[in-house]
Image: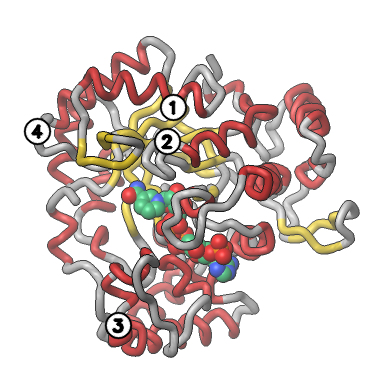
């Protein structure tokens, strides 16, 4: 089983033999441009294979508890969940995931429920050739009937069954970061922590994570088995985790992985005040995508556009760099189905805003009323 010391990093300390093996693996995978990882810390390196400028992660890493990852990960959900776009094929998505690896991304996020199941299969196929060089995160916690999600289930025996399926689909013998996706009201979180601890002892998982939990649940779970990361929605627009969740993570030495870092595309300038959504689009049921919310919330997008433009950054880059500047233990996982969007998002990682810039920006955005986001106290209960 791999541990952190034998996971290849993109930093200077990367073992050369590991690097050679990585490049060999990628060449075997038929992608051939792993050379973009070769120790550069520049934002852009020449991608001779495609004749265009290619963003790379360079020598950066971040820590989620004891786990070392690239400073941003890749959220794979929308590749096949049908959430934000029709499910894409493995043929189209495997190159996006491998393209992320080539650019130095080492952290990949999926879940049993995305698809369901198909997302893990795509991620597993894409990462099989470089399995020992990447950190694979997946999530359990739902029940399925006739291939469809049917409530929550975190009984220890259900977790064990879920993990066996995950390992097969992900084509691996261990899940690096195994999250509880949503708290099951019928199973105490201590029991879940104990069950995951057993799987870790057996080598089927390496680290334990929680998603969308309150500070109280985090403390209870952490007391039973150490939690490595909490994953919850967090962006310039959705800031409820600033109410005690981030502080609890900091106190306990737990990493934080924000999903929705570009607010499901809104902060990436994907929509405008005329955008409208109707069923079956997932966006139709998102409170911040109602016509009133979109029109109201354009003010914050305009602020992000202005701040980004002054710094030569796109709105998506500004939004991701803002999260990276909030705390060093934060690792955003922007989701995308497009390599050029991934490259744009990676471009955020070399910028850190100063404390005074952060304070000035916060003063400006806190004056804007937002519509459709969680109340501050929502962070104090499990989602
Ligand atoms: N724990 C949880 O409960 C939970 C919930 C939701 C998601 N997640 C995880 O978190 C990941 C990220 O969250 P998310 O996907 O919901 O939200 P997100 O990352 O804020 O937004 C993803 C959307 O933004 C678009 N986008 C990203 N970069 C862009 C760019 N540079 N320019 C234009 N559009 C861009 C993508 O469209 P394109 O495909 O067109 O690029 C995609 O539709 C997911 O993939 C999933 O792994 C976890």
Secondary structure found at label 3:
helix
Q: Position of residue 240 (x, y in %)?
A: 24, 63
Task: Tell me, for residue 166, which label it has, or none.
Answer: 1
Identified at 63% across, 63% down, the residue is 341
- Label 4, residues with CA under 10 Å away: few <14, some 14-19, many ≥20: few
User: Label 2 belongs to which residue?
Assistant: 138
Q: Marks 2 and 3, Cα distance to the nearest angstrom?
A: 32 Å
Q: Residue furthest front?
A: 146
> Do tag 3 and tag 4 residues touch (Cβ < 8 Å)?
no
Q: Marks 1 and 3, Cα distance to the nearest angstrom?
A: 37 Å
User: Label 4 belongs to which residue?
Assistant: 186
User: Label 3 belongs to which residue?
Assistant: 293
* Left or right: 251 as drawn, with respect to 93: left
Badge 4 or badge 1: first in the primary sequence: 1
Secondary structure found at label 2:
strand
Q: Position of residue 292 (x, y in %)?
A: 28, 87
Q: Position of residue 196 (x, y in %)?
A: 29, 22
Location of residue 194 with respect to 38 vertically, above or below: above
Secondary structure found at label 4:
loop
């Amino acid at each position: 089983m791999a541990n952190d010391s034998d996971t290849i990093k993109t930093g200077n300390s990367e073992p050369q033999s590991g690097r050679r093996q990585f490049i060999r693996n990628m060449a075997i995978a038929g992608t051939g441009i792993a050379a973009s990882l070769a120790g550069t810390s520049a934002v852009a390196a020449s991608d001779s294979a495609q004749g265009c400028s290619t963003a790379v992660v360079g020598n950066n890493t971040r820590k989620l508890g004891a786990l070392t990852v690239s400073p941003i990960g890749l959220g794979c959900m929308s590749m096949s969940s049908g959430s934000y776009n029709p499910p894409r094929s493995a043929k189209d998505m495997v190159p996006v995931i491998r393209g992320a690896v080539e650019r130095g991304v080492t952290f990949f996020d999926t879940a049993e429920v995305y698809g369901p199941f198909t997302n893990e299969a795509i991620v597993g196929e894409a990462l099989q050739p470089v399995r020992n060089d990447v950190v694979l995160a997946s999530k359990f916690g739902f029940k399925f009937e006739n291939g469809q999600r049917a409530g929550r289930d975190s009984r220890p025996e259900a977790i064990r069954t879920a993990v066996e399926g995950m390992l097969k689909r992900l084509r691996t013998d261990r899940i690096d970061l195994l999250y509880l996706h949503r708290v099951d009201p019928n199973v105490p979180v201590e029991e879940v922590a104990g069950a995951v601890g057993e799987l870790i002892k057996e080598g089927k998982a390496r680290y334990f994570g929680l998603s969308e939990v309150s500070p109280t649940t985090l403390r209870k779970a952490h007391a039973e088995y150490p939690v490595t990361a909490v994953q919850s929605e967090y962006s310039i627009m959705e800031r409820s985790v600033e109410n005690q969740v981030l502080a609890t993570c900091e106190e306990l030495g737990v990493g934080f992985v924000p999903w929705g870092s570009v607010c499901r595309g809104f902060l990436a300038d994907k929509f405008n005040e005329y955008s409208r959504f109707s069923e079956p689009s997932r966006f139709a049921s998102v409170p911040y995508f109602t016509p009133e919310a979109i029109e109201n919330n354009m003010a914050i997008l305009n602020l992000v556009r202005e701040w980004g433009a002054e710094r030569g950054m796109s709105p998506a880059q500004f939004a991701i760099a803002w999260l990276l500047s909030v705390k060093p233990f934060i690792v955003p996982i922007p989701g995308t189905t497009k390599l050029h969007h991934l490259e744009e998002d990676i471009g955020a990682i070399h910028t850190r805003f100063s404390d005074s810039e952060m304070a000035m920006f916060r003063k400006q955005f806190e004056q804007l009323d937002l519509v459709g986001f969680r109340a501050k106290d929502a962070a104090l209960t499990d989602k």
